[in-house]
Amino acid sequence: DAGVIQSPRHEVTEMGQEVTLRCKPISGHNSLFWYRQTMMRGLELLIYFNNNVPIDDSGMPEDRFSAKMPNASFSTLKIQPSEPRDSAVYFCASSQDEKLFFGSGTQLSVL
Amino acid sequence: AQSVAQPEDQVNVAEGNPLTVKCTYSVSGNPYLFWYVQYPNRGLQFLLKYITGDNLVKGSYGFEAEFNKSQTSFHLKKPSALVSDSALYFCAVSAYAGKSTFGDGTTLTVKP
């Protein structure tokens, strides 16, 4: 298996623009997680899905953030409108048997 | 609520010496405990986990961790450090399979 695949690897955008991050989990994994990593706040759980259903979105910082999982092999995290303070590395992870498998992340810079 | 504390931002050891990276946790009920490693510009990689059973857990790359319920600790250890072990290490806790809370991470530097 290719592992968790995230795209794009890097995204540079201007404040106010819409940003969409994509994730393909490992086939057969029934849980998917979106994390955000910054120097100031460390690794934060934004939202997680189980069997494509959002279970806990309490970590989503604002209504500007939304996430979907239309099927077992694809998820998106959208920020609209983006702000400079959203700049971070966003990780997607999938899991089975408790342990998490992380993608390589999307480095987002909002100017 | 569940939480993890990694009291050391940095740990420095000489190659060949034993290393310990500390972690304490707080959770309601029986904990699921994990260690992950992150190399520069990469996602986190699973090292080992404790769910139940033997308090000493062995994982990847020669790492092991000891679960201590009375001290609510789960320290990561390795008998002989390698320069290639230099990375950022995260401890994580979950009250159930799924939502894990991560510590702030400890940067391990192994010097030749």
Image (cartoon, coloured by chain):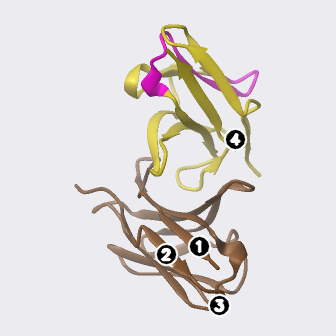
Relative to A8, B97 lies left or right:
right
Q: Nearer the viewer, mark 3 or mark 4?
A: 3
Give the residue number, with chain letter if any, for mark 3: A81
Q: What's the mark number on residue B57? A: none
Q: Position of residue B53 (x, y in %)?
A: 50, 24
What is the spatial separation of the Cα atoms under label 2 and label 1, in whole angstroms?
6 Å
Identify the residue at image location x=72%, y=73%.
A85
Give the residue number, with chain letter if any, for mark 4: B29
User: Which quarter shows the N terminus of chain A?
Assistant: bottom left
What is the spatial separation of the Cα atoms under label 3 and label 4, in whole angstroms?
40 Å
Give the residue number, with chain letter if any, for mark 2: A11
Q: Which residues are magenta?
A: B67-85
Relative to B102, A67 lies left or right:
left
Q: Earlier in the sequence, mark 3 or mark 1?
A: 3
In the image, the chain rendered in brown is A
What is the spatial separation of the Cα atoms under label 2 and label 3, in whole angstroms?
14 Å
The three-letter amino acid code for the residue at tag 2 is Glu
Identify the residue at image location x=40%, y=73%.
A8
Q: Is residue A36 above or below residue B81?
A: below
The three-letter amino acid code for the residue at tag 1 is Ser
The three-letter amino acid code for the residue at tag 3 is Pro
